[in-house]
Amino acid sequence: MADLLGVAVLGAGHMGADHVRRLDRVVSGARVAAVADPDTARAAAAVAGIEGASVHAEAAAALAAPGVQAVLIASPGPAHEEALLAAFARGLPVLCEKPMVPDSAGALRVARAEARLGRRLAQIGFMRRYDAGYLRLKSLLDSGELGRALMLHCVHRNVSSPPHFTSAMLINSSVAHEIDAARWLLGQELTAVTVLRPASSAGAPAGLVDPQFVLFETERGALVDVEVFVNCGFGYQVRCEAVGETGSARIGEEHGMVVTARGGAREEVPQDYLVRFADAYDREVQAWVDATRRGRVTGPSAWDGYAASVVAEAGVRSLTDGGRVPIDLAARPDLYAPAGR
Ligand SMILES: NC(=O)C1=CN([C@@H]2O[C@H](COP(=O)(O)OP(=O)(O)OC[C@H]3O[C@@H](n4cnc5c(N)ncnc54)[C@H](O)[C@@H]3O)[C@@H](O)[C@H]2O)C=CC1
Ligand SMILES: O=C1[C@@H](O)[C@H](O)[C@@H](O)[C@H](O)[C@H]1O
């Protein structure tokens, strides 16, 4: 066990428990050293049967636990800033679930704190960058075969949203993924956003603006549209079509198992992200563990996390106030690469 990377996992809910399982049973080179959750019964359930993993109510206690060399943050977004700064103070590498920090002022504090250290410690959990389809699309766009990218058409549907989900969260929790994917795929910053409200679905909880239609503009004139619909009831569907001057490419229509029975055929559709992006989460966490063990930090940066928060905040403003909202990023510290690199 001594040469395995000892990881503290903060938050043992849906994502945290899944990451604990992944660190314990799927990825190589790591072990779960500690788990923190104010609901200690949940933390204890997540590590049941895992040798040497301690359970804590407080994140700070998990970071200080014996054997902890790195941190995976899977607590709710509002808890991330404190956890990231505490990890930085201890010099611990971090994989932080999205949103890095939901409000852009807090996100900027985190990026600037890391920049002051002069080295990256954080990888942000935008796992689509590790999905086989998104990786193929990125390399096709970079190859130039589609010509100059003009548009991305995106669909993001969830079967249902959790009880605490708000209209703003369709943008800062769900479309957060398209925001990062668009910056990465196109290698461009998003410069303005307009959110439109189609008629809300009868399947959505009362008062939730669902679905929404989001239109982003980019610095070199491309447009990115996103249909986000988090109570569609029929499946977890994430698609993206890139349209360039000389071609187009579409991902997210991979076929599930086709079942033929009782004289008919049906195709299985994933019901949630843990199934649809299972391989992407595995690759993301394996890449993080591998890089960390080599003393490196790769993948989406704290700057990508900050940019996503600024864009999402502008989107929420457009949703609430109406109209087109320009997006302004602070000056990028030298530590960080431009969008898409
Ligand atoms: N990459 C992806 O596709 C997904 C990412 N997420 C992200 O993962 C994070 C967690 O989401 P879920 O697991 O769905 O939430 P959840 O509500 O299922 O679990 C969160 C857990 O964190 C615990 N917690 C609360 N405050 C804490 C603190 N200060 N320190 C440690 N634990 C604390 C809660 O008691 C709860 O057990 C969020 O940032 C969310 O946006 C969630 C779903 C998918
Ligand atoms: O990150 C995620 C959730 O937090 C979000 O609420 C869902 O809409 C996304 O599909 C999922 O990937």
Image (tube, grey):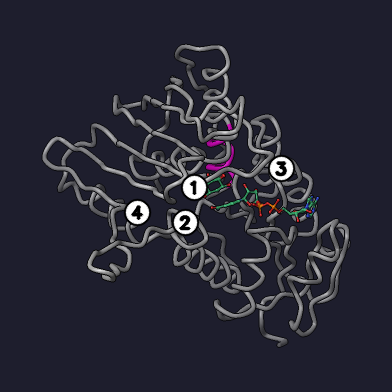
Residue found 55% across the figure and 78% down from its top: 26
Labels 1 & 2 near each other (Cβ < 8 A): yes
Quarter residue 165 falls in: top right
Nearest the viewer among 139 and 323 is: 323
Judged from the image, the secondary structure of the residue bearing numbered disc 2 is: loop
Labels 3 & 1 near each other (Cβ < 8 A): no
Residue 134's tag is: 4
Position in image of residue 326 (x %, y %): 48, 17
Q: Earlier in the sequence, mark 4 or mark 2?
A: 4
Q: Earlier in the sequence, mark 1 or mark 2?
A: 1
Nearest the viewer among 94 and 272 is: 272
Location of mark 1 (residue): 159
Q: Nearer the viewer, mark 4 or mark 2?
A: 2
Location of mark 2 (residue): 271
Instruction: Give the alpha-carbon distance from disc 2 to disc 3, as whole Å.
Output: 38 Å
For the residue carrying disc 2, how many other residues have a C-alpha within 10 Å: few (<14), some (14-19), or many (20+)?
A: some
Q: Earlier in the sequence, mark 2 or mark 3?
A: 3
Q: Is residue 169 left or right of residue 253?
A: right
Quarter residue 72 falls in: bottom right
Q: Earlier in the sequence, mark 4 or mark 3?
A: 3
Q: Nearer the viewer, mark 2 or mark 3?
A: 2
Position in image of residue 194 (x %, y %): 44, 19
Q: Is residue 177 left or right of residue 269?
A: right
Judged from the image, the secondary structure of the residue bearing numbered disc 3 is: helix
